[in-house]
């Protein structure tokens, strides 16, 4: 069994210029936890998830705990601190999205996808053909496959 056999084909995607508040509402309305970010040619450029948007749920632009938590991060990794700060104040998807996205091709075996998700601690993997999003495999898709096999 391969990615193409279990992937969700009607993938909701967003563009880098979109407003993060609209994307948050999109996730809520569709009961999903993340979506691929694509450019005008439908090429994958990132992923935006609930985790990326959680900080936006507060009224504050910078949460009270940022000074303590990110001060520690700043000392250990100034680049990560800068990226976190940018996410806290993001108004567009391109500033909040995760740019390093793990993806698979349509003929990637399901076992390899499960291993990738486990190893990288990710919940969804876009399925690409020629750099364009053709589908997405989520943990839920993998669970459905396991239940079908055992049922």
Image (cartoon, rainbow, N blue to C red):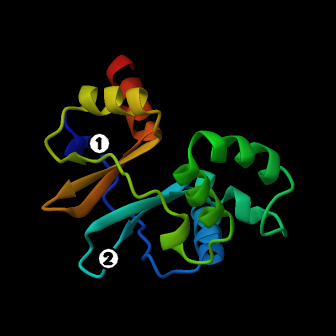
Task: Give the position of the C terminus as an image quadrant.
Answer: top left
User: Relative to 148, is 124 above or below?
Assistant: below
Residue at (84, 68) in percent of width and height: 60
Q: Can residue 56 be seen in this view?
A: yes
Which of the 4 image quadrants contains residue 120? top left
Element on which disc 1 rests: helix
User: Relative to 69, is 130 above or below?
Assistant: below
* Residue on which the image places disc 1: 6
Foreground disc of the pair 2, 1 = 2
Mark 1 closeness class: few <14, some 14–19, many ≥20 residues within 10 Å: some
User: Residue 77 or 25: which is nearer the viewer?
Assistant: 77
* Residue 39, numbered label: 2
Residue at (38, 52) in percent of width and height: 100
Marks 2 and 1 close (CB-CB < 8 Å): no
User: Residue 2 or 89: which is nearer the viewer?
Assistant: 89
Residue at (68, 70) in percent of width and height: 89
* Pointer 2 or 1: first along the chain: 1
Which of the 4 image quadrants contains residue 108? top left
At which x and y percent is residue 81? 61, 53
Task: Give the position of the N terminus as an image quadrant.
Answer: top left
Element on which disc 2 rests: loop
* Residue 139, numbered label: none
For residue 106, side relative to residue 102 (left or right) = left
User: Residue 132 or 4: which is nearer the viewer?
Assistant: 132
At which x and y percent is residue 85? 65, 61
């Amino acid at each position: 069994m391969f990615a193409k056999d279990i992937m969700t084909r009607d993938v909701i995607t967003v563009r880098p210029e979109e407003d993060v508040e609209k994307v948050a509402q999109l996730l809520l309305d569709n009961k999903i936890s993340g979506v691929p970010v694509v450019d005008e040619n439908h090429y994958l450029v990132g992923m935006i998830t609930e985790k990326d948007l959680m900080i936006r749920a507060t009224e504050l632009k910078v949460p009270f705990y940022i000074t303590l938590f990110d001060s520690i991060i700043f000392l250990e990794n100034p680049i990560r601190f800068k990226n976190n700060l940018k996410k806290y104040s993001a108004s567009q998807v391109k500033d909040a999205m995760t740019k390093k996205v793990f993806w698979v091709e349509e003929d990637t075996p399901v076992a390899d996808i499960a291993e990738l998700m486990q190893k990288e601690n990710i919940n969804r993997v876009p399925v690409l053909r020629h750099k364009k999003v053709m589908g997405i495999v989520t943990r839920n898709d993998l669970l459905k496959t396991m239940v079908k096999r055992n049922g």
